[in-house]
Amino acid sequence: MNANETIEALDSPARVYQREAVQAAMEQKDDVVPLLLAHLEQVLRDPEKYVPPEYESNLPLYAVYLLSHHRVREAHSLFIALMSLPEEMPFDLFSDTIHEGFPIALWKTCGGDPSDIIRLVENRKANEYCRASAIHALSYGIAEKVLPREKVVDFLQGLFTGEESSPDKPMIWNTATSSLARLWPGESIHVLEKAFDDELVEPFFIGMEDVEYYLEEGKEARLAAFEREALRELARTPHEEMSWWACFNPSQNQGYSFDDGSHTQKRKRSAAKKKRKQARTARKKGRPRKKRKH
């Protein structure tokens, strides 16, 4: 399978995971990467053309995970631009990949320079869930020992108290709280206590009892656990990231259908529904298994 055949397979509307083509794309970096970049450039130029269900191909999703896997620096500005599209367009194009795949993709393609990621966090015109994914991306730089933890913590604290503060954007505060807790909340405890007192953080996403649990773990133990989990996430292959999706496994997900209007429903879903899904992801990726006993 050459590069063009690989892209053709990934671009098909097949309802099965294209394992052979994904594997070929993982092995043919030099030949496949330019084609993946060119496709995302087309998506950026005319995003409405690539919105499901009218657009049936999964190529944009495959492109995100494969370019992330290869740590393609040239993809970074494309990712930032796609996540900066107005209103619901990023979700229309990428659905749950916004918070499941893009945090890692943003970090892996930034070349160790978080400047554009930080600008996305601060971009008040961007979708708040895209901004939240950018917050999450910064933590991977700490796990890989590229970004100083102290600088990231200072920046995240500023989302509550400084010029970066984002009024009326609870997802920003939710994610910043979760990140500060996972990075050990010792230096941030007073900021977080005030955020909970001021009801900035939504309790279904993370509670003060969770923050206290992380605090009581101790800094060394908490950071070691955080690093192990983050590095496991960074090491996942595109196969591990995508092959289990419900759309590729309808027999294991009764009632799922590509033609049942699910994409349209996703585009119309409310902010509350997205927050619930985001909250489940946050809990899965770092909240304690047992809450502290009082």
Image (spheres, grey):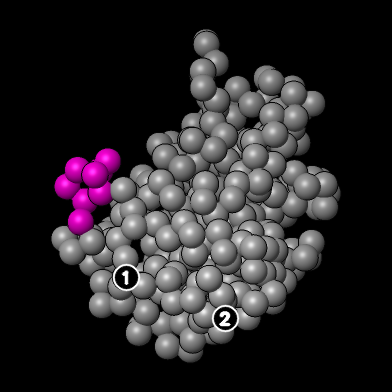
Q: Position of residue 37 (x, y in %)?
A: 59, 79
Identify the residue under disc 2: 35
Outermost residue on the front side: it is 1
Q: Nearer the viewer, residue 193 or 37?
A: 37
Q: Residue at x 54, y 54 (%)?
A: 238
Q: Position of residue 188 (x, y in %)?
A: 70, 38
Q: Nearer the viewer, residue 75 or 199?
A: 75
SS under mark 2: helix
Circles 1, 2 touching at the beta carbon (< 8 Å):
no
Q: Position of residue 261 (x, y in %)?
A: 18, 64
The answer to if 252 sits in the magenta stretch is: yes
SS under mark 1: loop
Q: Nearer the viewer, residue 272 or 220?
A: 220
The amino acid beneath tag 1 is: Pro
Outermost residue on the top side: it is 294
Identify the residue under disc 1: 13
Cα–Cα span, label 1 and label 2: 18 Å
Q: What span is in magenta?
A: 250-257
